Amino acid sequence: MSPIIRVDVPLGDRSYPVLVGAGARHELGAVLPAGAQRAAVVTQPGIDVGVDPGVPFETFVIPDGEQAKELATIGKLCSGFARFGLTRRDVVVGVGGGVVTDVAGFAAAVYHRGVAVVHVATTLLGQIDAAVGGKTGVNLAEGKNLVGSFWQPAAVLCDTDTLATLPPRELRAGLGELAKYHFLGGDELAAERFGAESLDALPLAERVAACVAIKADVVAADETEGGRRALLNYGHTLAHALEIAGRFDLRHGEAVAIGLRYAALVARLADRIDDDRVAEHQRVLDAYELGSQLPKGVDHDEIIELFGRDKKATDGITFVLDGPRGLEVVPGVSPGLLRTALERM
């Protein structure tokens, strides 16, 4: 068995380890906060990943899918925590993908005004993105992740054994987030950038750890998304709009892949990048066998309206766009330009 890879998220006295590798979930007892007397394990149906926190625990099962990401779920969890007797010195353990880490993290942040949380990420998307960095939240009818908080975990465990149990589509959806890291300074991923034949050049655990290291660096520099951290949302503005529109059978990572191609087209129309750089985006998506076509039936007016509700939109419609200096947050993007890019998708 390969050794566990440790990546630290450096946040001073709130720094924490991310452990990556086969069997990492079995380190749960070792990373639990000192003094925790009990644990509330939050998970979803069908996540057949057993954990042992080493203290008395109760399991709380939230609904499957994105419908779990609502304020009513948080209220039910907190009521359950109270009945269980969870105190401020105890711990919440999220076992699952991005939905679980978002919900468990937010519930931990607001219960007793904050109890510790440890994430056991069981999907590729959760391991390389959602579980790391402390962003938690739920959706409203008006938009995705509009209610939430920054609440850093005490530790994150990325057990790559759990990825073997994922349906092929779920694993592929996680590759949509992995593709994003190619444009965030993912030098460790460069060997596999230009063709499917080299995708296995880096072992999976090392690919996950490389993404975690990139995110840890960004989070350390901008914990609460005041500037650079927004770059982690590359490809997400269209992705979130498609998800909120809600009429398309898309996983989050699949929507991100479409959003990456769209962001490249927007940057090209704005003369920020050239055709070769647009083609590079497509090569990365093709290497991961990710679809990049806009779903049929997309209402362009609705999508542009949803762009304006995106949480980055503080000065007109705001996008993360590629350019001569790499990725940048660009406010005030023209709706006309965005409409033209949609038409070219």
Image (cartoon, rainbow, N blue to C red):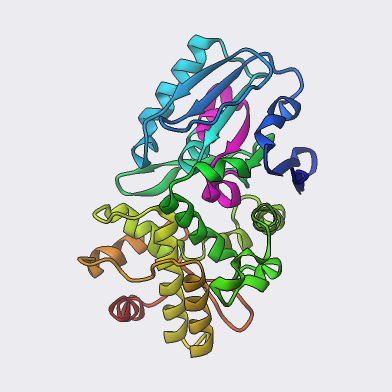
Asked whether residue 305 appears in the rendered view, the answer is: yes
Question: Residue drawn at (42%, 46%), measured in percent from left and top?
Answer: 146
**Front residue of this view, candidates 33 and 95:** 95
The question of residue 169 being in magenta is answered with: no
231 relative to 222, above or below? below
Q: Is residue 124 magenta?
A: yes
Against 278, residue 150 (above or below) is above
Left or right of 279 in this view: 39: right
Q: Main secondary structure of the magenta part?
A: helix
User: Where in the figure is residue 334, as x and y percent of width and height?
Assistant: 37, 78
Which residue is at a point 49% across and 43% down the rendered structure image?
A: 98
Residue 309 visible in image:
no
Pinpoint residue 264: horizontal percent, then vertical percent.
46, 77
**Magenta region:** 104-131
Please state which of residues 231 and 183 is positioned toward the viewer in this rendering: 183
Residue 124 location in percent, x, y?
Answer: 54, 49
The residue at 27%/52% (across/down) is 246
